[in-house]
Amino acid sequence: MPLFRRLPKRGFSNKQFAVRCEIVNVCQLERFEDGATVDMEQLSKAGLIDSIKSRIKILGNGDLTKKLEVAAHKFSKSAEQKITATGGVVKVV
């Protein structure tokens, strides 16, 4: 049997190059005061994310009743709609 058939095959892994985002739902933003600016520092102080250096994605799970100015790296369409429907502002960092 040839050598190339006897040796184990190893595939490509994208794990080291993948971009990982920490997820925050819209319902978790209810803990901030009305009219507040929510950015990475505020999310870290509230304990919603592990580090300020991590990338953040806001998802639209839950309801939002407060007017907030939210700054994050990514937003889902439903989260963006829920934030702007209450009069809030969405900022992509």
Image (cartoon, rainbow, N blue to C red):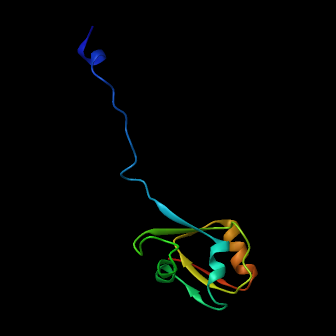
> Residue 49: horizontal and vertical position, in percent?
49, 71
Q: Nearer the viewer, residue 45 or 54?
A: 45
Q: Is residue 18 above or below residue 77?
A: above
Q: Is residue 9 above or below residue 22?
A: above
Q: Give the quadrant of residue 67.
A: bottom right
Q: Nearer the viewer, residue 13 or 31?
A: 31
Of the 4 image quadrants, the one containing the N terminus is top left
Name the residue: 72% across, 78% down. 64
Name the residue: 42% across, 54% down. 18
> Residue 2: horizontal and vertical position, in percent?
26, 11
> Residue 15: horizontal and vertical position, in percent?
39, 48
Q: Is residue 19 above or below residue 40?
A: above
Name the residue: 64% across, 85% down. 68
Is 72 on the left-hand or right-hand side of 82? left
Q: Residue furthest bottom?
A: 35
Name the residue: 74% across, 73% down. 63
Is 25 on the left-hand or right-hand side of 86? left
Q: Give the quadrant of residue 61.
A: bottom right
How many marks overall? 0
Q: Give the quadrant of residue 5.
A: top left
> Residue 29: horizontal and vertical position, in percent?
63, 78
Q: Nearer the viewer, residue 62 or 12?
A: 62
Q: Residue furthest top?
A: 1
